[in-house]
Structure formats: C-alpha cells, structure tokens
Image (tube, helix red, strand yellow):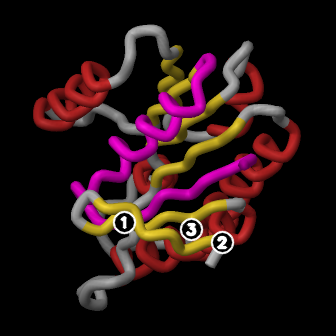
Amino acid sequence: MKSTLITGGARSGKSHFAQEMALKAGGAVLFVATAEAGDDEMKRRIEEHRRARPSTWETLETTTHVGRHISRHIGKAQTVIIDCITLLINNIFQQHGLYNDEEIDEALIGKEVMAEIGELVNCIDQSDARFIIVTNEVGLGLVPPNKLSRLYRDLLGKANQMLAQHADEVYMMVAGIPVTVKPA
C-alpha cells in the first residue's frame, strides 16, 4: 500500500493505530508532527505523543508546507506518518490571525488549504515511501454556530476527501477499533 488515511473523532485511537501500522511495516519511520505548542496544555499533549513514539523514529515538526518539508527530510524513511491534517489546516487559519468571523477571505484560505493538500499528494506520488495520514472527522456533529468554524469544518472535509480519494486504504476509528472504509 502506498498511502493510508486514518480518520475518526478525537481520542478515537487514530494516532495509536497509525503507529502500530508503521511498526508492523518495519523499516525507518519519519514522523511528521503538525501540532504547535501554543499553551502549556498543548505542550503536555505534544510531549505525551513524543514519549509514545519509538526513539529510533525521526521526527519532523512542521506547521505548514508539509509536502515540501517531507521531500527535503525524508532521508531513508520507508514509512511516513503525518499526524495530523486537522492541525495542519488549523495552522493555515492561524497564519491569517483568524479567531472570529471578522474579515474572513474564504477564497484565499480555501486556495491555501487546497494548495497544501495538493502539495502533500504530489509528495506522496513522488516518493517510494509508504504514507500513513491521520486526520479528524469533524463533520458528524452539529453545524458550527459561526462562519469561521463552518469554514474550517468545510475545508477540512474537502481536504479529507482529497486525501481519501488518493489513498489506497481508508480507516475510520470508532472507540479504538479500525473500521475499513476503503477498499470496500
């Protein structure tokens, strides 16, 4: 398999499942972390994730332009884990200083999100490594109460669709149990 997309809700076991897949595949692993430690609680979460990974894995921390950074740092990695697309899209929003509904340039942000995902898909296509991509499924709940949150949900949904269409395998995590979505 060339690429696998793992989606699901928060704390559904996505990251653990991705790491288990990489361990079973064997070989060198590049772990791509997209989280940014904006506060103490997030710093603790990032540190927990670091401790959960094997020390032999290379880690690349990057908040945007993931495809470009992977291409530069892939080295001899046979497997690349990207954890996660949810935070990657959030990072694009943060670059615009978006915290409320004021002055949202939906077209510009949408273009940047699609370019980011396109760059990642291109990176996958040009690499011999296996890719395991983690993302959240945020479209299963209530319609968000504000424009900014709805735009985020919609763009993450589009990004997930692009990645799922390109992936050889797609899993939906439900309470720590992987459910095969693709191939059906």
Res. 36 in view: yes
Q: Position of residue 35 (x, y in %)?
A: 37, 38
Rendered residue at 70%/21% (across/down): 74
Does residue 110 appear left or right of residue 54 in this picture? Answer: right
Q: Are marks 3 and 2 in contact (CB under 8 Å)?
A: no
Rendered residue at 23%/23% (across/down): 47
Residue 109 vs residue 15, the one in the foreground: 15
Rendered residue at 56%/57% (across/down): 5
Does residue 134 appear left or right of residue 117 in this picture? Answer: left
Q: Is residue 3 magenta?
A: yes
Q: Earlier in the sequence, mark 1 or mark 3?
A: 1
Q: Which mark is residue 8?
A: 1
Give the extent of the magenta segment: 1-28
Residue 114 vs residue 85, the one in the foreground: 85
Does residue 40 appear left or right of residue 47 in this picture? Answer: left
Q: Residue furthest bottom?
A: 143
Q: Position of residue 31 (x, y in %)?
A: 51, 27
- In the rendered image, the vertical position of residue 60 relative to residue 137, given as above or below: above
Q: Which mark is residue 149?
A: none
Q: Residues within 10 Å of mark 2 (few under 14, many from 20)?
A: few
Which element is circle 3 on? helix
Q: Nearer the viewer, mark 1 or mark 2?
A: 2
**Residue type at tag 3:** Asn
Q: Look at mark 3 in the image and give the residue it sits on.
A: 160
**Residue type at tag 1:** Gly
Q: Are marks 1 and 2 in contact (CB under 8 Å)?
A: no
Q: Position of residue 2 (x, y in %)?
A: 74, 47
Q: Is residue 82 magenta?
A: no
Q: Residue furthest top?
A: 56
